[in-house]
Image (cartoon, rainbow, N blue to C red):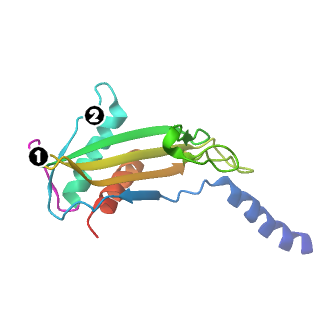
Amino acid sequence: MISARIGLPMALVLLAGCAINQDLRLGRSGPGLAPGATVAITAAPEGNAEAARFAAALTDALAGQGYRVSGSAPVTAVFGFARRDRAIGTADGSAAAGSTPAGGITWISAPGRKRLLQSCRGERLRATLAFYAREEQGLIARVTGEIDGCTFTQDGIDALAKALVREAAVR
């Protein structure tokens, strides 16, 4: 009887290690995108279906937040999008990175570690979205975001695009 009371809670704790933390991590610089701005989105690279889906998700996210999308807009949106194994990180290799931590690497996106009983290798969606004023040739906002999970569908791509657009807005 005692082992059943202890065994079930212990099994639940151990099985909780299967899930990958899907917290969205965001970063932003710049003053922000003004409400109702008209934006032109740069074209996705030819032959890159995932980048094209992300561009479409950005268009929908901008419209959903009250922005207008037009090819001749005074604001240009430039984006980068990647899906990769979460065990692969991105390091800052520039000399401008300055002093490095004890491990000798300055991470832009640190690799994820596989947890005990994790059910999958995991993948990471990472995107950068920058808005530039065409006439002033200046940065309006630059937003980065990433999220880890076992697998991502279009819903995950859409959610990342919406989060980036919300984060880019003037506060």
Residue 63: where, in percent of width, then height?
A: 19, 56
From this viewpoint, which residue is outermost toward the top? 47
Image position of 90 (left or right of 165): right
Quadrant where the image shows the N terminus: bottom right
Q: Residues within 10 Å of mark 2 (few under 14, many from 20)?
A: some
Q: Is residue 91 above or below residue 20?
A: above
Provide the residue designation for mark 1: 70
Residue 61: where, in percent of width, then height?
A: 26, 55
Give the number of marks. 2
Question: Label 2 sits on what residue type?
Answer: Ala
Residue 125: where, in percent of width, then height?
A: 46, 45
Query: Is the stretch drawn in magenta largely helix, strand or loop?
Result: loop
Q: CA distance from mark 2 to mark 1?
A: 15 Å
Q: Residue 68 magenta-drawn?
A: yes
Residue 121: where, in percent of width, then height?
A: 63, 41
| Marking on residue 44 | 2
Image position of 167 (left or right of 132): right
| Marking on residue 40 | none
Q: Residue 144 magenta-drawn?
A: no
Q: Residue at the spot x=59%, y=38% of the render?
A: 88
Magenta span of residues: 65-72
